[in-house]
Structure formats: structure tokens, C-alpha cells
Amino acid sequence: MISFREGDSRDAALISHINATSWRKAYRGIIPQHYLDRLPDEYWVPSVRAWLDSGRFSALIVLEDKKPQGACIYGRSRDESLAGWGEIVSLYLLPEARRRGLGSRLLEEAVSRLQADGYARLFVWSFEKNLPADAFYRRHGFFPSTDRESVPLGGAVIHERRYVKAGD
């Protein structure tokens, strides 16, 4: 059975573990392997705690048979030029939970909650070379914008693209 629960800063280690585990698998060939090999499970703990303690962002954890399988952090845009937009900050599943519809359910629930909070326009950033994520977000009504960013990771520059979704 699939269910959701709201997360809080006490879930920072769990969310960070999900993110890091997912990165190690999903970003092979996109981010240098030596970076992924050394990525600690605890990498995002301080960020997740700060985001959730600030009240600006919310966390949603998807469970299957009461076991956490993925997490999403979402809330008001971090980009001041997009005031009034909602942002999916992160959405990751454990690798063994992929391809079972959990990511779709998690994204749909986060989008629904953002829309209930009054956000008619939403966005998410994704690595340009992440073709599965491109297809995933397009299936859910997000489309690539012209906005791009470059992020240095592991001695390489990784390019990100913003995907946007207008209200339904």
C-alpha cells in the first residue's frame, strides 16, 4: 500500500540518505563517478534541516507498506525573480523503488499541495543530460524553459535546465 507522510527536520538524515542513494545510481555518466563514489549519505542533512526549520519548504515522504521509498521537498520559489511561483526543490526515490509509479504519485501529491497553497505556476531544476527526468517531468506537464544554470561538481561543470508548469 502506498501512503504519504509529511516530513520535518527530524527526517533530515532519511531524506539525505534517499537523495544520496538516488544520486549515486541516477547520475552515473552525468556527474563524475569519483564524486558520486564519495558522496556521503549525510551530505544534505544541514540543508534539509535548515529548509524545513525555516517554514519556507515542506517535505513529503512516500511510503510503500509503511517503508520510506522517496522524498520530495517543495515550497515557495528560492528564485526572487519568480516570486509567487512554487518550486520542487528535490524529488528522489531509492533506486529499488523506481519504475513502480511511486515517483509519479510523489510528484502529483507535491504539485497538488503546492496548488492548494495558491501556487498556480511551478518549476523544478533538472540536469540537462538526465533524459529519464526530462521524460518524467514532461509526462507531468512540466516543460523546459530557456533558463539554464551551470553547477561545478567533482571538477566538471554540470548544466541544469528549469522545467515549468502553468496552472491546470
Image (tube, helix red, strand yellow):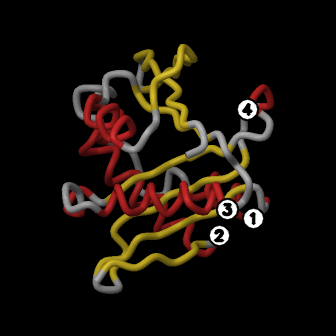
The reply to whether discs 1 and 2 touch (Cβ–Cβ < 8 Å) is yes
Q: What mark, if any, has residue 116 been given in the picture?
A: 3
To which quarter of the image does residue 51 belong? bottom right
Residue at 34% x, 44% y is 23
| Labelled disc at residue 79 | 4
Q: Secondary structure at mark 1?
A: helix
> x and y percent of residue 138 in the render?
37, 35
Query: Which disc, if any, is residue 149?
Result: none
| Distance Cα–Cα, label 1 vs label 3 | 21 Å
Give the mark nearest the N terminus, 3 or 4. Answer: 4
Q: Are marks 2 and 4 in contact (CB under 8 Å)?
A: no
At 19% from the left and 55% from the top, the residue drawn is 99
Lower sequence index among marks 2 and 4: 2
User: In 3D space, how far apart are the residues under numbered discs 4 and 1 (Cα atoms)?
Assistant: 19 Å
Q: Nearer the viewer, mark 3 or mark 4?
A: 3
| Outermost front residue | 168
Displayed quadrant of residue 79: top right
The disc, 1 or 2, on the residue closer to the chain's N-terminal end is 2
Q: Secondary structure at mark 2?
A: helix
Q: Could you tell which of marks 4 and 1 lies nearer the N-terminus? A: 1
**As drawn, 117 above or below 153:** below
Q: Which residue is mark 2?
A: 9
Position of residue 48 measured from the top left corner of the image (x, y, whole percent):
61, 57
